[in-house]
Image: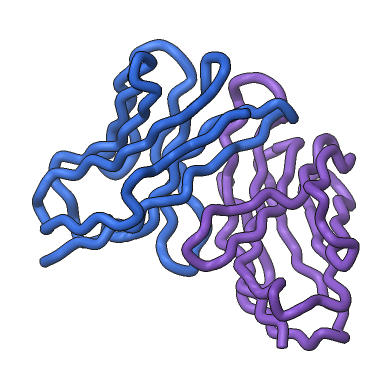
Chain colours: A blue, B purple
Amino acid sequence: AQSVTQPDIHITVSEGASLELRCNYSYGATPYLFWYVQSPGQGLQLLLKYFSGDTLVQGIKGFEAEFKRSQSSFNLRKPSVHWSDAAEYFCAVGPNNAGNMLTFGGGTRLMVKP
Amino acid sequence: DTEVTQTPKHLVMGMTNKKSLKCEQHMGHRAMYWYKQKAKKPPELMFVYSYEKLSINESVPSRFSPECPNSSLLNLHLHALQPEDSALYLCASSQDRAGPYNEQFFGPGTRLTVL
């Protein structure tokens, strides 16, 4: 069965600093990988996705992620964090054996210091 | 229109009440989902509808009853809930179950409190 691990529960960075959120997955085939962001009390917004092709994917809000098959990782990066980036970030992999289902990681809470 | 809407935004109900959550999308998506999310946790899948038919029920208690009246609407009927059912309920939709176009679009959620 597939699984997703986000090793960092909380991360605090200063505004303007660079950011990397880690995501490791376990999957038996070529995965579809996603990063979602959730502001408090809100739904999830898709930041970016990887299906195939170029392993460096660009997303919205200046985010990018790199798929590394050898490390089973799909880490999210941003060169300069803004205070509005403070939120919960979820990595997800799909589909699972039941079809178009997503398996979510536990999430990483990002806090931004002024 | 790339939006999933959910009503109400907040709902407070007693354990004997009957209420419904509503979700709507006009993107032509044929798969719709209900998730439950507790605080500081990832969303947990509850139900999946594919082409208006229930295709997945993740062993959800019968006090939650989903309904898909048409391809744009998804309801979640609630009856005799327990306080531990208090959570954020998220609706999502995707183009289809199969193939690479399985990006899920999420609504803003309904914050449910059961007293």
Q: Residue at x 35, y 14 (%)?
A: A70
Q: Residue at x 39, y 56 (%)?
A: A88
Asked if residue B62 is positioned above or below residue A48 in the image, the reply reads: below
Residue B11, given in percent of the width and then of the height, sits at 68, 80
Residue A16, given in percent of the width and then of the height, sits at 9, 52
Q: How many marks?
A: 0
Residue A107, given in percent of the width and then of the height, sits at 43, 51
Res B32 → quadrant: top right
Q: Is residue B46 left or right of residue B42?
A: right
Q: Quadrant of the C terminus of chain B?
A: bottom right
Asked if residue A88 is positioned above or below residue B98 in the image, the reply reads: below
Residue B77, given in percent of the width and then of the height, sits at 85, 67
Q: Residue at x 50, y 26 (%)?
A: A26
Q: Residue at x 46, y 30 (%)?
A: A25
Which of these two is toward me, A6 or A78?
A6
Which of these two is toward me, B53 or B57?
B57
Which of these two is toward me, A5 or B52?
A5
